[in-house]
Amino acid sequence: MDLENPISGLSPHKVRRPWWFFHLFGLLLFMAIFSIIILGRSFRVKTPEFFVNSMFLSSNYPEIKGSWNVSLCMKNPNPDTYISYNLAQVWLFYKETFISTAHVMPFYQGSGDGEILTVHANIGMKTDEIEEDFTEDRVLIFDLLMEANIRVNSQSFLQRKRFLIVECNDLRIEFPLNQTIGTLSGGQNSCRVQLYGRKPVCF
Ligand SMILES: *[C@@H]1O[C@H](CO)[C@@H](O)[C@H](O)[C@H]1NC(C)=O
Ligand SMILES: *[C@@H]1O[C@H](CO)[C@@H](O)[C@H](O)[C@H]1NC(C)=O
């Protein structure tokens, strides 16, 4: 047994890399980081837009009782992207008093406009809350609030998660005489939309 050199025959030559290897490696690393920054910048999430398209509220004067529904027209200004909506919920308020809420099933939104989201729920308002406004001009003004978890570009590894809050204020619902249904008066109402990185604590 060769005690002087027990691993003789096993010692390989140290692999010598050419002088340019580390330069090339550094260049590739630099290019990778640079393109990640460029991609990240080119993929800023633009806020989706919402309009109240129509709104109906059933009334049996002297009570507002039955159901309401609202259809929201949505626009996704991010080109070639899908937005998925999850855990979406809508609240209806009358003079800062909570009236009714509805959960919305998860849904997708393509880029561009033209998509309509319809939400409906039940309602029961006490007469004394509304009597004064109702008898005056048969117009009640509501506020609508929607929040949702959204994922922009949800099929891609570049997906972005955001928390969305939509506020549609001063929705004038007019109740024509002798009709049991009140409708939105005054055309399209645009909503205020805000995006957050995650759900705000104070909300
Ligand atoms: C909303 O309510 C109105 C009045 O009740 C009804 O005519 C309409 O079909 C409803 N829309 C939806 C999508 O439920
Ligand atoms: C409204 O309803 C009342 C009582 O039901 C009726 O006498 C009246 O003719 C109705 N008016 C109209 C415009 O339909």
Image (spheres, rainbow, N blue to C red):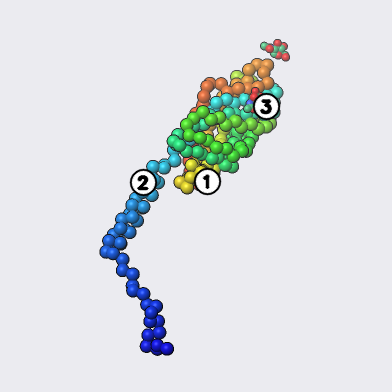
Q: CA distance from mark 3 to mark 1?
A: 33 Å
Image location of residue 65, percent across then percent down: 69, 28
Q: Is residue 197 visible?
A: no
Indicate which quadrant contains ligand 2.
top right
Q: Which mark is residue 141?
A: none
In the figure, residue 86 lies in which quadrant? top right
The residue to which callout 1 is attached is 199
Q: Circle 3 sits on which residue?
A: 64
Q: Residues within 10 Å of mark 1 (few under 14, many from 20)?
A: some
Q: What's the residue type where badge 1 is placed?
A: Lys
- Asked if disc 2 and disc 3 are in contact, CB closer than 8 Å, the reply is no
Q: Left or right? Give the position of 174 relative to 60.
A: left
| Residue 38: assigned label | 2
Tell which circle, 3 or 1, labels the residue nearer the N-terminal end. Answer: 3
For the point 37% across and 88% down, which residue is it? 4
Using a 10 Å C-alpha cutoff, classify the residue at mark 2 as few (fewer than 14 neighbours), some (14 to 19) or many (20 or more): few
Residue 133 in picture, x, y percent from top left? 61, 24
The residue positioned 41% from the left and 42% from the top of the image is 43
Kindly state the secondary structure of the residue where label 3 is placed: strand
Find residue 1 and report its horizontal and vertical position in percent. Answer: 42, 88
Closer to the eye: label 2 or 3: 2
Task: State whether residue 35 is above or below residue 9.
Answer: above
**C-alpha separation, residue under disc 1 versus residue under disc 2:** 27 Å
Task: Give the mark nearest the N terminus, 1 or 2.
Answer: 2
Q: Kindly indicate whether the residue at mark 1 contacts the one at mark 3 (C-beta within 8 angstroms).
A: no
Q: Based on the displayed image, in which of its 4 quarters is residue 69 positioned?
A: top right
Q: Is mark 2 within 8 Å of ligand 1?
A: no
Residue density around tag 3, few if under 14, some if 14–19, many if 20 or more, within 10 Å: many
CA distance for labels 2 and 3: 54 Å
